[in-house]
Image (spheres, grey):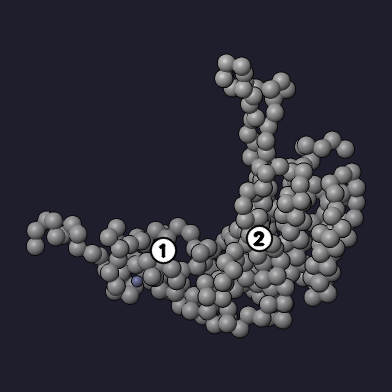
């Protein structure tokens, strides 16, 4: 066999024995995995290179057991809108976080409420200067400078799992332009609702979860507007008003 043949000889997967792709598959600490085996791993599993083949085998067993949990998962609540959603089965005290609409076939990790550690809301603001064009075709700043803003809403959840520590939710599915519009408000309310529900899952009752869901449903239909009274109704705020106010970039744009 010449050098050329060796170079293009397909490597085999150390888990299932199938051929890896032309690029040699995905490396782990002491071996490699084919595409099909990689697709069976949890999407939250990070840093594959630090896992040994023995650990990967153990993880795949966990993933098979997870598939059974997915089959038996009975949705009682769905929270979220266009992006990543939170699914609950309050009878079994389990949750699923996924952005996949065809989620049953994607084997999303089923977590117990008791595995939740904490979470944080993060709204990323992106700022871009708007320039004007001068008569000779050059770009120039306005005085004072003008900006356009865009936003993405995330909830980061720390969980107690042998396989991963952080699960992230991208609440909106595409970047939202500006803060003074319905899209922003909707993504904001869903983010707040997700946070409130998450914090009630560990010790809260089913009644409380239902109360929170009803509360946010009414907030959405009431078209709550961002003004000085925005945070005055603290009914469902387990985390407290200040927590949300501090994390909402609108705070720096409106002076109340
Ligand atoms: Zn394989």
- Counting every numbered tag in the picture gives 2
Mark 1 touches mark 2? (CB < 8 Å): no
Quarter residue 56 falls in: bottom left
Horizontal arrangement in the rendering, residue 215 relative to residue 1 (left or right): right
Residue located 66% across and 81% down the image: 74
- Whether residue 236 is visible here, answered yes or no, is no
Quarter residue 220 falls in: bottom right
- Few, some or many C-alpha atoms within 10 Å of disc 1 (few <14, some 14-19, many ≥20)? some
Q: Mark 2 near ligand 1 (CB under 8 Å)?
A: no
Is 249 above or below relative to 240? Answer: above
Q: Residue 24 location in percent, x, y?
A: 29, 60
**Which dot, 1 or 2, sits closer to the camera?**
2
- Few, some or many C-alpha atoms within 10 Å of disc 2 (few <14, some 14-19, many ≥20)? some
Q: Nearer the viewer, residue 82 or 9?
A: 82
- Residue at mark 1: 51
Q: Nearer the viewer, residue 244 or 132?
A: 132
Ligand 1 position by quadrant: bottom left
Is 4 above or below relative to 76? Answer: above
Residue located 40% across and 74% down the image: 57
Disc on res. 192: none
Disc on res. 82: 2
Q: Secondary structure at mark 1?
A: loop
Q: Residue 6 location in percent, x, y?
A: 15, 60
Horizontal arrangement in the rendering, residue 24 relative to residue 154 (left or right): left
Q: Residue 232 location in percent, x, y?
A: 90, 51
Residue located 67% across and 44% down the image: 177
């Amino acid at each position: 066999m010449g050098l050329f043949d060796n170079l293009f000889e397909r490597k085999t997967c150390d888990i299932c024995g199938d051929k890896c792709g032309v690029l040699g598959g995905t490396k782990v600490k002491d071996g490699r995995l084919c595409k099909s085996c990689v697709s069976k791993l949890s999407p939250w599993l990070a840093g594959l290179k630090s896992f040994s083949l023995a650990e990967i085998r153990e993880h795949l067993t966990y993933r098979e057991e997870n598939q059974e949990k997915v089959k038996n998962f009975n949705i009682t609540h769905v929270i979220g809108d266009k992006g990543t959603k939170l699914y609950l089965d309050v009878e079994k005290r389990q949750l699923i976080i996924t952005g996949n609409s065809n989620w049953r076939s994607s084997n999303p990790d089923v977590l117990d409420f008791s595995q939740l550690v904490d979470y944080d809301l993060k709204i990323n603001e992106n700022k871009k200067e708007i320039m004007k064009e001068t008569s000779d075709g050059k770009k120039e700043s306005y005085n004072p400078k003008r900006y356009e803003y865009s936003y993405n809403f995330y909830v980061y959840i720390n969980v107690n799992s042998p396989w991963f520590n952080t699960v992230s939710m991208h609440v909106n599915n595409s970047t939202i332009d500006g803060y003074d519009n319905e899209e922003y408000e909707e993504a904001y309310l869903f983010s707040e609702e997700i946070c409130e529900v998450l914090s009630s899952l560990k010790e809260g009752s089913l009644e409380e979860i239902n109360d929170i869901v009803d509360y946010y449903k009414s907030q959405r239909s009431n078209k709550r507007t961002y003004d000085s009274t925005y945070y005055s109704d603290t009914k469902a705020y387990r985390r407290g008003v200040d927590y949300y106010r501090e994390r909402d970039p609108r705070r720096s744009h409106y002076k109340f």
